[in-house]
Image (cartoon, helix red, strand yellow):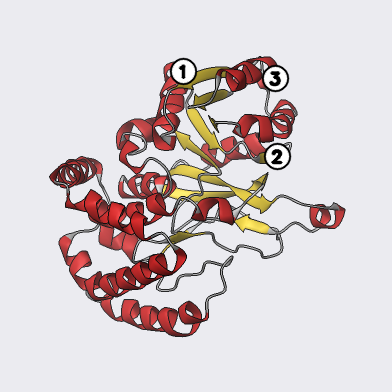
Amino acid sequence: MVNYHDYAERFLTLCRDSLRGQSYPADFFQVYIVDNDSSEKTSEYLVREYPEAIILPRSNGNYAAANNFGAKEAIKDGCEYVVSANMDTEMDVDWLKELVVALDENQAAGIAQSKILLYPENDKERQEPRINSLGNIIHFLGFGFTGHYGEKDCELSDYPEIKGYASGCSFIFRADVFKKIGGWNEEFYMYHDDIEFSLKTRLAGYKVILAPKSRIFHKYEFSRSIRMFYYMERNRYLTLFIFAPARYLLLVSPLLFAMSFGMLLLMVVNGTFKQAMKITFYFLKPSTWIRIWFERMKIKDFSRIKFNDVAADFSGRIEFQEISNPILKYIANPIMSVYFRVIKKFI
C-alpha cells in the first residue's frame, strides 16, 4: 500500500483492522506501506498504529515509483505473489485468500483483480452493495473507466477474463510477471498506471482475470481524481504513443485530433488551460520521445501478443458513469462507436 501525505491518518485504521482479520494465515503474508512524501508526524503514526507492517519511506510523491519500490522489496523478501491495494478500503475476511486462490487455479493469469464494491454509507447499502469495478475498460482513444459502476452486486461464477485492465485499487500479480514486464513505468507518475501495467501483462501473454469472491469496499471519490487532470490527460496520450503501432495511430488520428480539440475547449471553460499547455510542452521535448522509444523497444522484447489483438477488446464508447454529459452521450459516443466499428476491420 502507498501512503501519501495525511492519507494514512484518514484511512489506515479501518484498512488495518480488516487486514488483521483476514482468513489467510498471518504467517504467510507481509504488509508493506510505502510512505510516499509524507511528514515525520505521519511516519511516526504509521509505526505506532501498524507495528507489524514494514514501512518503506520515499521522498517524492511518484505513485508508480512507490509501487515499484514496495513490490521489489516484497520480491526480495521472497514473496511469490504481490498485491497492490489502496488504503481507502475495507477488505472482506476472505479478500486475500480468494486473490491467492485465483492465481493458484489460473496458471495462465498474470493478474487477478478483486471485486471492488463501493463503500457502504449505511446498513442498507451494506446489505445491498453497489459495484465500483468488475474490471475496467479501455477506450480506443486511451481513456480508462470502471466497468459496471453503480450496478447492484451479483454472484459471479468462475474467473471471468478482464478484457480491459485491472483496477489499481486491488489486484494481485505474480512476481515473475513483474520481473518480465519491468514493473510500473515510473514516467506515468500517477493515473493510467494500472492501464499501463495491465497492458504490458496482456502483451506478455498473460490473462487478466477477476477474482469475484475477493471482495473489497472502496471509498471511491471521483472528484478526487479529476483534480489531477494533467496526469490523466497526459498519460492518456503517453499510453497510446508507447503501446500503439503507427498503423493504429494513423487510423484513430481523425478522432484523436477531434477529441483533443474538444478537451482543449473543455479546459478553457473549466479553467485548466495552463494544464493543456503543460501537456503540450511535455510532448514537444525531445527527451519525452526518447523515453517513449526506449519503452516501446522494451515492450517489443517481451511481447508475445500483438497490440492489435488486444485493441480488438477496446471500447468505442466513453462511459464515465459519474458524469452525465449530453454531448458525450448523444453526439460523441454514437460517432466514436461507428468509427471504431469501421476501423477495427483494418486494425
From the image, tell me which residue sits under label 3.
49
Dividing the picture into quadrants, the one containing residue 272 is: bottom left
Question: Could one spot residue 226 in this view of the protein?
Answer: yes
Choose mark 1 or mark 2, whichever is in front. Answer: 2
From the image, tell me which residue sits under label 1.
78
Q: Residue at x 37, y 68 (%)?
A: 263
Q: Position of residue 281 (x, y in %)?
A: 23, 52
- In this rendering, would 305 be left or right of 316? left
**Three-letter residue code for mark 1:** Gly
Q: Position of residue 150 (x, y in %)?
A: 66, 63
Q: Position of residue 271 (x, y in %)?
A: 43, 62
Q: Nearer the N terminus, badge 3 or badge 1?
A: 3
Crowding at mark 1 (Cα within 10 Å: few <14, some 14-19, many 20+): few
Image mark count? 3
Dividing the picture into quadrants, the one containing residue 147 is: bottom right
**Three-letter residue code for mark 2:** Glu
Element marked by disc 2: strand
Q: CA distance from mark 3 to mark 1?
A: 25 Å
